[in-house]
Image (cartoon, helix red, strand yellow):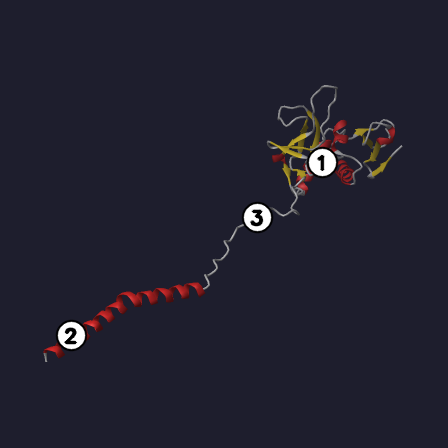
Amino acid sequence: MKKTLMLVLLVLGLACAAGGYYIFYLKPMQDAEEAAMQAKNKVAPVAPAPQVSMPISPSKDVKPVTDYYVSSERLGVREAPDSDAFVETIVYRGDKLYVLEKKEGWGRISPYYVYKEGGPEVAEWVPMDALLEVPPTITKQERLETVSSYIEGSDDFKQHFEMFIKTTDSLLKDGTCVPPDFEELKGWVRSRTYSEQAVYFVYCGGLKQANKIYLNVENGEIFYR
């Protein structure tokens, strides 16, 4: 009986030892090997490529604005980008200008010139704040006032106001004359050659006889000699 009990205890001890060996040693090794096999066969996920934001550059088709229109009734064109610079000429409301360069609020509308050897470069400049990107809208009243200002020094201006305005406006619109032509003589001058008729004249494009335009204010006829 005693021997049998010892045998049973021995068998139980061996069984416990075998169970401990499996649980604490063999099983962890099998799990580790299985995990290694799975990791080896598993394909690592591919990370998405980072999104690179490209700067948006302006379209090559977009060109800088170079064509402008005079918004002031009269605008002095100066020889330097300075309000105190010498005024070389005058441009008028609605005149179209091509701006070659912009500098500190001024626009250059001519090439650079050197008038004497070793002298400074000069060009024609106008203030940008006096220019528009589109032609100005001019009402009939504004047009009347503008044309009137060109010829208000005409002989008998009040007496023949309507005919002077109508003819002057027509000559300006068709390009026969420009505002400085009328400002040269301060308007229409009474002709001595045709003293017996109500005829007046102005020079357009020069001061030669060929540039002399006559106007008969009684019938609106324009003629040359």
Q: CA distance from mark 3 to mark 1?
A: 49 Å
Residues at badges 1 and 2 in contact (C-beta under 8 Å)?
no
Q: Which mark is residue 123?
A: none
Residue under label 3, please give it: 56
Q: CA distance from mark 3 to mark 2?
A: 86 Å
Question: On the rendered structure, is 55 left or right of 91?
Answer: left
Instruction: State the residue lying farthest toward the right.
Output: 225
Question: On the rendered structure, is 49 left or right of 31?
Answer: right
The answer to whether residue 33 of the structure is visible from this angle is yes
> Which mark lies nearer to you, 1 or 2?
2
Instruction: State the residue lying farthest toward the left.
Output: 2
Closer to the camera, 15 or 132? 15
**Secondary structure category for the residue under label 1:** helix
Kind of residue indicated by mark 3: Ile
Residue drawn at the location 51% of the way across and 53% of the way down: 51
Question: On the rendered structure, is 25 left or right of 134?
Answer: left
The answer to whether residue 185 of the structure is visible from this angle is no
Q: Quadrant of residue 156?
A: top right
Is disc 1 surrounded by few (<14), some (14 to 19) or many (20+) residues within 10 Å? Answer: some
Is disc 3 surrounded by few (<14), some (14 to 19) or many (20+) residues within 10 Å? Answer: few
- Mark 3 or 2, nearer chain start: 2
**Secondary structure category for the residue under label 3:** loop
Kind of residue indicated by mark 1: Val
- Mark 1 or 2, nearer chain start: 2
Q: Quadrant of the N terminus?
A: bottom left
Kind of residue indicated by mark 2: Leu
Residue under label 1, please give it: 147
Residue 21 percent coordinates (x, y): 26, 68
**Secondary structure category for the residue under label 2:** helix
Residue under label 2, please give it: 9
